[in-house]
Image (cartoon, rainbow, N blue to C red):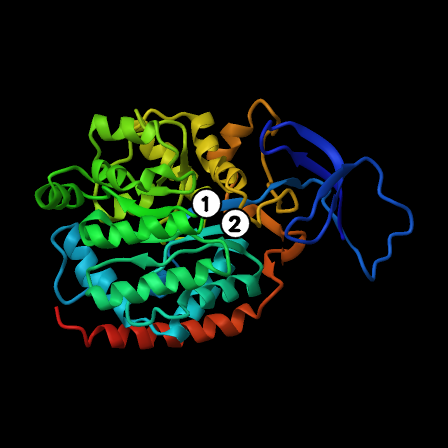
Amino acid sequence: MIYLKNATYIDWKTLEFKSVNIKVEEGIDGKFELINVLPDNIDLQDNLIIDCKNKFVTKSFANGHHHVYSALARGMKAPKKIPRNFYEILKYIWWTLDKSLDMDMIETSALITAIACAKNGVTFVIDHHSSPFAIKGSLETISKAFDRVGVSHLLCYEISDRDGLFITEKALRETEDYLRQKQGLVGLHASFTVGDNTLKKAVDMAEKYNSGIHVHTAEDHYDQKYTFETYNKNVIERFNEYGVLNFNKTILVHCLHLSKKEKEIISKSKSWVVQNTESNLNNNVGYFNSQGLGNNIMLGTDGMHSDMLRSAKASFLVGQGYDTINLEDTYKRFRKVHKYIDINNFKGDKGNNLVVLDYDTPTELNNSNFLSHFIYGIESKHVLHVISNGKLIVKDKQIQTVNEHEILETSKEMGKKLWNKMKKFSL
């Protein structure tokens, strides 16, 4: 049991402030309780007391769309041929990288991603993985790595026809093997790399395992252009025809280049949209606009980083010129992922997932101005302690569950190995 004493608790739903002690129970279904007085004679061998005087405690964070597979890309050199458009960015960078991954690289990528998430206050990650030449066992490898760190997850493999139907079948088998054992989604890359037969198989599998589809959607104009030229319909019309949008668990990522009709289809469906502002900027694919998409919008990082507070700030600031978004809207999108997890009965995001913020604000922080502090003040550097499923995984900004130094040393070697391997792929 963990006791947080002298805390200022911020209710993540109502933003009500309470000066209180908090009792936190360990376990994936563990509870937490606000208590006025700590029990007498707490056994310190079996329980932990953390003094949170002048600290703020609230629900930890979650990431609606991440990419473990990109973790070793930081600092790598530009490709031999400079991409001229989004398709070439995929071809010369990300599709070269994912084909170069082996299982050791995947494990290391998952560990360093989970560590980064934890230290940024993120205790639940929805990830979308790709490693075409290292598929079998990849999801279980990522799952075990995240479990070691103590970060809950909802995984999928990015099924695609781009590397041939033999690879497609491997990806379908990996997905089914994983869904038999654990919570997860059926991942697809995007409409323009998934043929009709593969799309049908993916939807059938989602139905079979009471899951949903996790897919990049109209991230670039190319997706729409190819889909219309090949199938004589737009991306969402095609997905809707095959039943992709029929699931409460379906996640449509990006949704930048959609017609009014497509947005209307999404808004009337059960599916969810994930906004990834910084990735869109980095790839120069366009700007997210929520108008007409409905209210099921959550935030992700698309593998750019693991900092959801940063993602929220970018969504708000960029949205001032390209979206209809205010402070309240931003916070709602930041927290909407918890609703997605809850209504779909996924495990790992109960009330015993908490973050303790050492926020040295120069001005008063209260219920009426919290949203302003959320955008302009609170940052990941203020994350002091993190509790995931009732277990302290970050204490005084240090990861508690694994040896971060050893993992980072390994990741440096894995990064070199990956970059050298990428050179062998012809352009």
Task: Give yes or no for contact between labels 2 and 1 (Cβ–Cβ under 8 Å).
Answer: yes
The kind of secondary structure element at disc 1 is helix
Is residue 131 among what the camera can see? no
Query: Is 190 in front, or is 377?
Result: 190
Is residue 86 among what the camera can see? yes
- Residue 101 appears in which quarter of the rendering? bottom left
Q: What residue is rendered at 19% in x and 56% in y?
A: 89
Disc 2 crowd, CA 10 A, few/some/many (<14, 14-19, 20+): many
Image spot of residue 371 (x, y percent):
51, 29
Image spot of residue 427 (x, y percent):
12, 68
Query: Is 322 in front, or is 240?
Result: 240
- Residue 229 appears in which quarter of the rendering? top left
Q: Which of marks 2 and 1 is nearer the N terminus?
A: 2
According to the picture, the residue beneath numbered tag 2 turns out to be 122
Which residue ends up furthest to the right in the rendered image?
Answer: 41
Please, is residue 363 above or below residue 70 in the view?
above
According to the picture, the residue beneath numbered tag 1 turns out to be 308
The kind of secondary structure element at disc 2 is strand
Dot label at residue 280:
none
Q: In this view, does 45 lie to the left or right of 318?
A: right
Query: Is 101 in front, or is 382?
Result: 101
Which residue ends up furthest to the left in the rendered image?
Answer: 229
Task: Identify which amino acid the numbered label 2 is placed on.
Answer: Val
Image spot of residue 359 (x, y percent):
59, 41
Image spot of residue 91 (x, y percent):
17, 60
Q: In this view, does 2 lie to the left or right of 60?
A: right
Q: What residue is rendered at 42% in x and 42% in y?
A: 249
Task: Identify which amino acid the numbered label 1 is placed on.
Answer: Met
Q: What residue is rendered at 38% in x and 75% in y?
A: 414
> Residues under labels 2 and 1: Cα distance?
7 Å
